[in-house]
Image (cartoon, coloured by chain):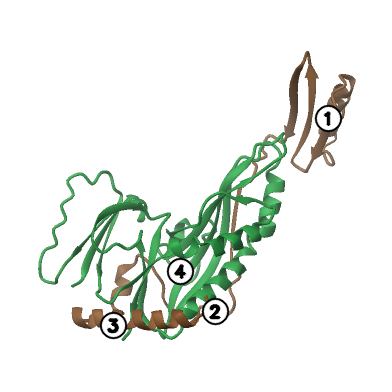
Chain colours: A brown, B green
């Protein structure tokens, strides 16, 4: 703003001069969209903070962002199933087991997992 | 005996505060689900859960001292973590960097791993408070091996005005994306436990994946990974 907008730059300069005349010590920061003049002063034993904010009227501060990881070529080639809420697409892949067999499969998994966990340094 | 789990969500597309109930349910009979005062709900799901199901509650897996330390180190001086770490589910269409992606459906579920943060600013700006999140996609290979991939990141905050949002964003942009590598390494290490196993199905369940009784949980903040192991 201060570099490509002469009028705004002049306004800032005049404000700084005004504060200097009032013996108020201030600092200024600027970027391409906004400037800020700030300082502190005391008057009759009261302490004050001064902030002058100048910005382009259509400037909207950005307070969020996000991005995806780079997708490597071939990375998803062997991707089979992912969690989703499209029930119909998932149902056909699952074989039904009896209660007895199901519990047996689960217990075998838990025993092997426990054994593996005890061997892993994690 | 299979368990029938019922979920009622406050928000459309299966999100938000979730009331659940699970009952043992044999085939060939009615399941009684009496909700006289369920309140206002915008979406529901029902799942019949097999006896061989393995459930892993994800929040206790990510909210550990070790991972908190890794995150704090990753953020450095850019921001300060102010909450524990949570893991909830999020449909792909609601992920902040969502776009039309070949092979992906809007209701594909990712796990959102997130925490609150704070940034101190000079006196002439308001401090910033917000949320940082990473998005993980679990999957099974065609052969039934379990995979987890960190798909992306996001941050969102209030404050930083009138002048400090640019500086805050610069610092966050310099540190947050790099956290994907850190998180991916942790996931890869954790998945070594499963390297010898093969699975028929992977899915997510709201909350801790309770198999009996009723309760409520916010699925945006807490979910479990469910797996059907092969014999």
Q: Is residue B149 above or below residue B97?
A: below
| Local SS, label 4 | loop
- Residue B104 numbered mark, or none: 4
Crowding at mark 1 (Cα within 10 Å: few <14, some 14-19, many 20+): some
Viewer-proximal residue, B182 or A5? B182
Q: Quadrant of residue B139?
A: bottom left
Tag 4 and tag 1, C-beta contact below 8 Å: no
Task: Write down the chain letter for disc 4.
Answer: B
Q: Which residue is mark 1?
A: A26
Horizontal relation, residue A26 to residue A73: left or right: right
Query: What is the CA distance from the residue labelled 3 to the residue labelled 2?
Result: 30 Å
Tag 3 and tag 2, C-beta contact below 8 Å: no
Query: What is the CA distance from the residue labelled 4 to the residue labelled 3?
Result: 31 Å
Crowding at mark 2 (Cα within 10 Å: few <14, some 14-19, many 20+): few
Task: Write down the chain letter for disc 3.
Answer: A
Horizontal relation, residue B208 to residue B191: left or right: left
Labels 4 and 2 positioned on one and the same chain: no
Viewer-proximal residue, B45 or A59? B45
Q: Quadrant of residue B214?
A: bottom left
Q: Is label 4 or label 2 in front?
A: 2
Viewer-proximal residue, B81 or B65? B65
Q: Quadrant of the N terminus of chain B?
A: bottom left
Q: Is residue B112 above or below residue A93?
A: above
Q: Which residue is mark 2?
A: A75
Q: Which residue is mark 3?
A: A105
Task: Write down the chain letter for disc 2.
Answer: A
């Amino acid at each position: 703003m201060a570099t490509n907008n002469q009028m705004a730059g002049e306004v800032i300069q005049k404000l700084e001069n005004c504060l200097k005349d009032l013996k108020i010590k201030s600092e200024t920061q600027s970027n391409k969209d906004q400037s800020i003049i700030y300082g502190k002063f005391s008057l009759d034993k009261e302490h004050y903070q001064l902030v002058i904010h100048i910005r382009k009227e259509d400037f909207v501060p950005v307070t969020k962002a996000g991005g995806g990881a780079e997708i490597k070529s071939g990375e998803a080639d062997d991707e089979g199933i992912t969690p989703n809420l499209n029930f119909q697409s998932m149902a056909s892949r699952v074989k039904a087991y009896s209660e007895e067999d199901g519990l047996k499969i689960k217990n075998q998994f838990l025993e092997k997992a426990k054994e593996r966990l005890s061997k892993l340094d994690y | 005996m299979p368990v029938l789990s019922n979920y009622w969500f406050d928000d459309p597309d299966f999100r938000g505060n979730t009331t659940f109930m699970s009952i043992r349910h044999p085939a060939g009979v009615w399941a009684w689900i009496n909700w006289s005062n369920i309140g206002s709900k915008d979406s529901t799901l029902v799942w019949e859960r097999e006896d061989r199901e393995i459930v892993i509650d994800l929040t206790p897996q990510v909210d550990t001292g070790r991972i908190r330390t890794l995150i704090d180190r990753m953020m450095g001086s850019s921001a300060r973590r102010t909450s524990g770490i949570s893991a909830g589910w999020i449909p792909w269409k609601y992920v902040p960097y969502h776009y039309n992606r070949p092979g992906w459906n809007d209701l594909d579920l990712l796990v959102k791993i997130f925490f609150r943060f704070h940034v101190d600013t000079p006196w002439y700006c308001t401090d910033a408070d917000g949320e940082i999140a990473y998005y993980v996609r679990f999957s099974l290979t065609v052969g039934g091996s379990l995979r987890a991939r960190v798909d992306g990141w996001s941050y969102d905050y209030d404050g930083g005005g009138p002048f400090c949002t640019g500086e805050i964003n610069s610092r966050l942009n310099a540190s947050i994306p790099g956290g994907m590598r850190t998180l991916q390494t942790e996931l890869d290490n954790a998945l070594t436990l499963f390297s010898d196993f093969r699975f028929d199905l992977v899915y997510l369940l709201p909350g801790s994946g309770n198999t009996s009784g009723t309760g409520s949980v916010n699925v945006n903040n807490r979910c479990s990974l469910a797996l059907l192991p092969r014999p």
